[in-house]
Amino acid sequence: MWNKRRLLLYPLLALIAGSLAMVFIGDPAHWLSTAGLLFDIAGLVQLEVSGVFARIIREYGDEEKWPGGPPSRITREIIDNPDTPIRTGLRNWLFFEGSTGLWFIFMGQLLQLAAVWAA
């Protein structure tokens, strides 16, 4: 199955190879840090592409383990108040969407990469 996120891996791998080559030419500390952070980003992208996160969510969202659905207090939290769709949507995105954490980690890695070069 073709996945657009796969296209991210090839440039990341090229950037990693370039960063490792630059260790011998430029400032080794910057380039090693850059290569390490790019490896982290590539690892996260690869986990998403390979479906690891989807499998984890599928396992814990199994209807056979929770035949009546989640406990009622959790159901109330998910449904919440229909009169506040923006607040409910934001909270659902932050706390119930499986890929949100992945993107937070990804953005953190990008910020760390920027910090390495700003120093």
Image: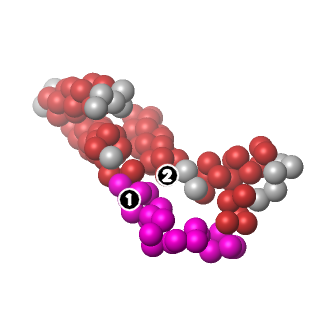
Secondary structure beneath label 2: helix
Q: Tell me if residue 88 comes above or below residue 115 in the rendering.
A: below
- Which corner quadrant of the image does residue 79 belong to? bottom right
Residue holding disc 1: 56
Sooner in the amino-acid sequence: mark 1 or mark 2: 1
Residue 73 versus residue 97: which sits nearer the camera? 73
Mark 2 crowd level (few <14, some 14–19, many ≥20, 10 Å Cα): some
Q: Residue 42's spot in the image, x, y percent?
A: 29, 39
Q: CA distance from mark 1 to mark 2?
A: 9 Å
Please tell me which residue is depicted at 21% across the width and 37% down the height of the picture.
28
- Which corner quadrant of the image does residue 68 belong to? bottom right
Quadrant placement of the C terminus: top left
Q: Residue 60's spot in the image, x, y percent?
A: 44, 65
Residue type indicated by callout 2? Gly
Residue 99 in sight: yes
Mark 1 crowd level (few <14, some 14–19, many ≥20, 10 Å Cα): few
Q: Residue furthest right?
A: 83
Q: Residue 73's spot in the image, x, y percent?
A: 69, 73
Q: Is residue 115 magenta?
A: no
Residue type indicated by callout 1? Ile
Please tell me which residue is depicted at 39% across the width and 34% down the height of the picture.
117
Q: Is residue 61 magenta?
A: yes
Quadrant placement of the N terminus: top left
Please tell me which residue is depicted at 44% across the width and 64% down the height of the picture.
62
Dots 1 and 2: beta carbons under 8 Å?
yes
- Which corner quadrant of the image does residue 96 belong to? bottom right
Residue 91 versus residue 3: which sits nearer the camera? 3
**Mark number for residue 25?**
none
Q: For the magenta stretch, what is the residue range?
A: 55-74
**Mark number for residue 98?**
2
